[in-house]
Amino acid sequence: METELINYESALDRLGGDTDFLNELLGEMLGQIDSDMVLLKEAVEVSDFKSMQRLAHGLKGASANLDITRLFHLFRELEECAEKENIDTANSLLPKINSSTDELRTYVAGL
């Protein structure tokens, strides 16, 4: 079973029902993912596990705060790969993260 992309209602509840603010935060999150993914890809390419762990941890936390469920799980898995120095699985996660980010971008554009 695939994890849901985002639990919008839960995130909205956390922000007191302020849809404009949530939508703004989601847009900012997409920008953060875009910039951090450049660094993450570079870290994976050179097996820089410390940078991978740090970046994945930050994105995992930001995803959790906004109930972006699928990306939370993917970033958690990437963080674990970095901790275990498992570069093969880390490489396999990047396309999944990109795909889920694209889905989130489409979702946010439709709000």
Image: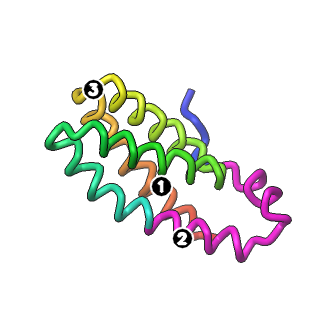
Q: Earlier in the sequence, mark 3 or mark 2?
A: 2
Residue 75 falls in which quadrant of the image? top left
What kind of residue is marked 1? Answer: Glu
Give SS at disc 1. helix
Question: What label does residue 85 carry, if any?
Answer: 3
**82 relative to 66, above or below:** above
N-terminal-most mark, 1 or 2:
2
- Secondary element at image label 3: loop
Left or right of 66, for residue 77: left
Look at the image and give the residue range highlighted in magenta: 7-31
- Disc 1 marks which residue? 103
Q: Amino acid at mark 3?
A: Glu
Position of the C terminus, as image quadrant, is bottom right
Q: Is residue 29 magenta?
A: yes
Q: Which residue is mark 2?
A: 27
Q: Is residue 10 above or below residue 53?
A: below
Which residue lies at the image location 85% right of the left edge and 65% below the top edge?
A: 16
Q: Residue at x 61, y 69 (%)?
A: 25
Residue 4 picture location, percent across and down: 61, 41
Where residue 102 sits in the image (x, y, percent)?
42, 57
| Number of dots carrying numbers | 3
Q: Main secondary structure of the magenta part?
A: helix
The quarter holding residue 52 reads top left
